[in-house]
Amino acid sequence: MSETAMTTPSAMDAVLTITPLTEQPGLRLIGEIDLYTIDRAAAALTDAIRSDAPEIYLDLAEVDYCGIEGLRLFALTAQRLGRQGRELVLCSLSPHLAKILGLLGWDTIPGLLPVPRRPFATTPAPVRTNPARPFAVPAFPDRAPWPLTA
């Protein structure tokens, strides 16, 4: 019987590029947000929210994968910003991540503004329901949010 070497994922396998946005305060994330990259993402987000801007933008259009630890990071950060009257805007959020946020009830966290990706020009824009919040994502009003603990 021959033994085969088992390889385990390493930080080298997971790639995440983080660059500051030039148009507004925030970050562009490209690649994967998982257990191997979450610390880098958290450190970059902590630096980004140090500004006193009312909205911090995260461009997620080129995120190939985001695990629950990434969504939790976004939710906890938004919760913190919400207590300060500020918002974390998740730009170009993939449909499946928007759905997970909704299922967990985290899309209703004060301070979190998920803006779903619009794959085609014919897709209707998010609905403006509150002038203070430019976009609304369908929520599940009959569900209590999944608890977040810091």
Image: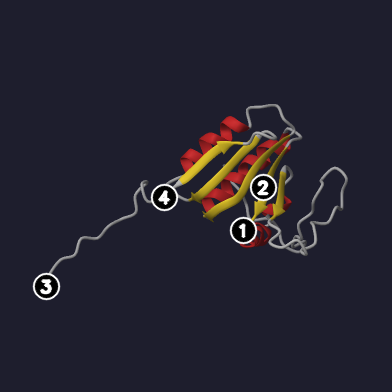
Q: Which label lies toward us, 4 or 3? A: 4
**Residue in the image at 72% along x and 52% along y:** 115
| Residue tagged 3 | 1
> Label 3, label 1: how many angstroms apart (C-alpha)?
44 Å
Position of residue 72 measured from the top left corner of the image (x, y, whole percent): 58, 49
Inter-mark Cα distance, 3 to 2: 51 Å
Quadrant in the picture for the C terminus:
top right
CB within 8 Å, label 2 to label 1: no
Determine the secondary structure under disc 3.
Answer: loop
Quarter of the image where one finds residue 110:
top right
Query: What label sits on residue 137 in the rendered view?
Result: none
Label 4 – label 2 distance at C-alpha: 21 Å
Residue under numbered circle 1: 97
Q: Amino acid at mark 2?
A: Leu
- What whole-number distance in Å separates the C-alpha atoms at marks 4 and 3? 32 Å
Instruction: Determine contact: label 3, label 2, CB under 8 Å.
Output: no
The crowding category of the residue bearing disc 1, from other C-alpha atoms within 10 Å (few below 14, some 14 to 19, many at least 20), is: some
Which residue is denoted by mark 2 in the rendering? 90
Q: Are marks 4 and 2 in contact (CB under 8 Å)?
A: no
Q: Marks 4 and 1, how far apart in space?
A: 19 Å
Q: Is residue 117 above or below residue 50?
A: below
Q: Earlier in the sequence, mark 3 or mark 1?
A: 3
Question: Mark 3 or mark 2, which has the lower sequence index?
Answer: 3
The x and y percentages for residue 123 are: 76, 63
Judged left or right of residue 9, residue 116 is right
Kind of residue at badge 4: Ala
- Callout 2: SS: strand
Nearest to the eye among marks 3 and 2: give it: 2
Q: Secondary structure at mark 1?
A: helix
- For mark 4, what is the residue? 14
Disc 3 residue type (three-letter): Met
